[in-house]
């Protein structure tokens, strides 16, 4: 595997239930929404939010440890002439810091960190925004 390559494998557990495994052995259940497993769309939203959260957290936590750090990602799942897709994707940060100079510095850095994540750093949202092509291969 090249240094730039990332991969996960998806194995069928039963009809409409799967187990994703990363190269480090981490596992995640995926389903169709009939149980509490994450759906593929929820995983997309989680990936966008987690990617941005990590970018922002690294920057602001150097200045002050947050009292609260929550990211909510939402969007509308639609079907139109282009097929099924998500639109109106929104990543909303709620981050609170303690009072004092360190908290003030972290609060000041927060909008800049979020913008940098969106504009340059978050691989997941950047990939979605530039509409990277996806190829499908069926192996015999």
Image (cartoon, helix red, strand yellow):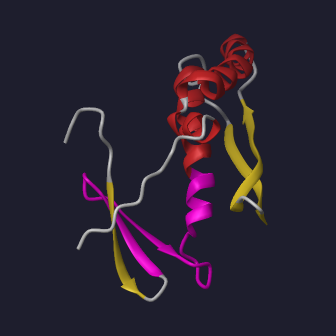
Confirm whether the magenta stretch covers residue 51: no
Return the residue found at the far left.
1
Quadrant in which the N terminus is drawn: top left
Judge left or right: residue 77 versus residue 60: right
Instruction: Please indicate whether residue 122 sits to the left or right of residue 11 in the image.
Output: right
Among the 4 quarters of the image, the one containing residue 13: bottom left
- The segment highlighted magenta reads 17-46
Is residue 28 on the magenta stretch?
yes
Q: Quadrant of residue 53?
A: top right
Q: Is residue 17 above or below residue 120?
A: below
| Residue toward you, 97 or 87 | 87
**Residue at x 67%, y 36% (from the top left corner):** 67
x then y, percent, for residue 100: 73, 15
Quadrant (top left/top right/bottom left/bottom right) for the C terminus = bottom left
Looking at the image, is 91 positioned above or below residue 13?
Answer: above
- Which residue occupies 69% across, 22% down? 115
Look at 60% across and 28% down and name the residue there: 56
Image location (x, y in percent) of residue 135: 43, 53
Is residue 24 toward the left or the right of residue 8 in the image?
left
């Amino acid at each position: 595997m090249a240094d730039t390559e990332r991969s996960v494998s998806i194995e069928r557990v039963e009809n409409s239930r799967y187990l994703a495994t990363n190269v480090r052995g981490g596992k995640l259940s995926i389903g169709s929404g009939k149980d509490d497993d994450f759906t593929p769309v929820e995983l997309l939203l989680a990936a966008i939010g987690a990617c941005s959260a990590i970018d922002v957290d690294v920057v602001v936590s150097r200045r002050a440890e947050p009292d609260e750090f929550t990211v909510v990602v939402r969007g509308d799942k639609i079907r139109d002439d282009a097929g099924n897709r998500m639109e109106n994707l929104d990543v909303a940060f709620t981050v609170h810091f303690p009072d004092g100079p360190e908290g003030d510095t972290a609060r000041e850095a927060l909008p800049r960190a979020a913008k940098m994540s969106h504009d340059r750093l978050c691989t997941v949202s950047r990939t979605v925004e530039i509409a990277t092509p996806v190829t499908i291969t069926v192996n015999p």
